[in-house]
Amino acid sequence: MAETDRREFLVNLLLAVSVIPGFGLAARHVLRYLVPPKRERTAEVLLARLSQLPVGTGREFKGVMGNDLIAARLPNGEVKVLSSICTHLGCHVQWDQVAGNFLCPCHLGRFDASGKVLAGPPPAPLPRYPVRVAGEDVYVTVPVKEA
Amino acid sequence: MRTPRQVPKWLAFLRERVPVNIEVFEELSKEPIPHHMKNWWYCLGGTPLMLFAIQVVTGILLTFYYRPSPEEAYASVRMITEEVPFGWWIRSVHHWAANLMVLAVGLHAIRVFFTGAYRKPRELNWMVGVGLLFTTLGFAFTGYALVYDQLSYWAATVGTNVAEQFPVLGPYLAKLLRGGEVVNPTTLTRFFVFHVGAMPTLMAILLGLHIFLLRIHGVMELDAPPEVQETPLTVEEDREGKKRFDPNRFFAFFPDHVTTELLVGMFLLTLLTVLAMVFPAHLGQAANPDQTPLHIKPEWYFYPVFRWLKLVPLGVAMAGLLLGGLLFLFWPFVDGAIRRRNPKSELGTLVGASAAVLLLVFLVWEALATH
């Protein structure tokens, strides 16, 4: 192999091993840049006062930071807050005071107080949100959804 | 040699539909390049072109997230910088490539000036080049304003007020830039449109013209006698003479010069990424039209003009800028007139050196000044 050929080969090799991975890495960064970040901002908001939510009852709250919620106060006094949108086809669930669980009137899906599917077609549980009770006030932490 | 039968099907398909002679492109790619171009200092013409390409790519990427309204601009820039994956990198590379582009265009102009590469028959290409320099500065000015933090907002205010003082055309120019008598919500939209629509179009046209003129003139041979300079080597003459060019004086554009430019491109990309990592693009407080910050300064490339404006009364300053700009634009003809009277005159070099020193002094002075 002639001296110049060897030199040319080494230069080309050096260029290839630096340029190709370099551009590959840059392309990867650019592709990642093009996927918008998920906004996972949450906020704690005052949802209700305990007096508005007697033991054993449930109540829907619409448009809380862009979320439709349903709150239920269980017989033991605990407050649960879940999404009120049925995971089946998007109807609003109601609190069934007699059965002590949530009912979707559209296709009779049923969810227990923690959102788990008990019966019917819903494919997934209702999303649940953290609740904090301070004195008389019920606070819930929900994702902030842009209008 | 391959017979037509051996041509792959896809190539035959393409040749039937795009009936151009590949050999013509091969000929064109072998543009003779004078030997002095192997020196890195002479690659400054290709450098801004590569930086412009980087600006186009990163600029398009930034517009995926940027929202050009006074309410949302700052928040969208903050989101690009802090939330979008690698957004800080894209924005910082765009920021640094803009700075390097101004620097490279400036150095290219200085090199062309002191080597006399603007002389007959290349005067018009010098003027196109001056247009490219001003367009680059216009890009930098409008781009800086889009960030919409305090400094960028007030730079737009001061900048458009300066433009307003320009003799005759000033008030119209300011109104065109701002979309009103003062900086208002329309201004940002206008700056955005100039930055991503009008100026790139102008740049593409001027660049096309610049390269076209360069190709038909050929690159100036640095040490050639004036009679050779004035009758540049063209590809056509060369092809008819069958002999491509004298290898002692020239080398081929492709692959030799292309390889050099590729190396410059790689160096630039590395430099830009290092700069982006070590000095990421800054984002200050959100724009507040009710409160001018205490120490406002433009970007470094406007320092000489900013210092000049502080030194002399506004009317004189603007007249000086106008005269200086016109002298710069028409310099090849002024120089031609000087050299017709006295072919050995060094007046041009003296004028250029004085202007360069003055610009440098004003730049450093403004950089060091606190007020």
Image (cartoon, rainbow, N blue to C red):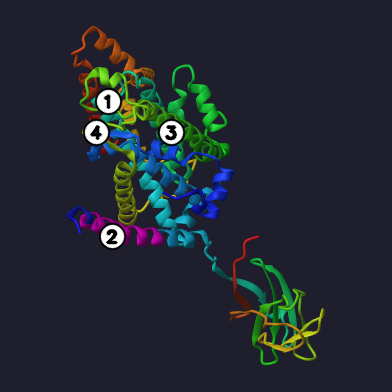
Foreground: disc 3 or disc 4 = 3
Question: Residues at marks 3 and 4, common chain?
Answer: yes
Question: Residues at marks 2 and 1, common chain?
Answer: no
Foreground: disc 2 or disc 3 = 2
Mark 1, residue position = B113
* Circle 1 crowding by C-alpha within 10 Å: few under 14, some 14–19, many from 20: some
The image quadrant of residue B323 is top left
Foreground: disc 1 or disc 4 = 1
Mark 4, residue position = B365
Magenta region: which residues? A6-25
Question: Residues at marks 2 and 3, common chain?
Answer: no
Mark 3, residue position = B207
Q: Nearer the viewer, residue B341 or B314?
A: B341
Task: Point out the tag, 1 or 3, that comes first from the N-terminus.
Answer: 1
Left or right? Give the position of A136 relative to B287.
right
Question: Residues at marks 2 and 4, common chain?
Answer: no
Residue A124 seen in this snapshot = yes
Foreground: disc 2 or disc 4 = 2
Q: Are marks 2 and 4 in contact (CB under 8 Å)?
A: no
Magenta run includes residue A13: yes
Residue drawn 44% across the image and 50% down it: B2
Mark 2, residue position = A13
Q: Which amino acid, mark 3?
A: Leu
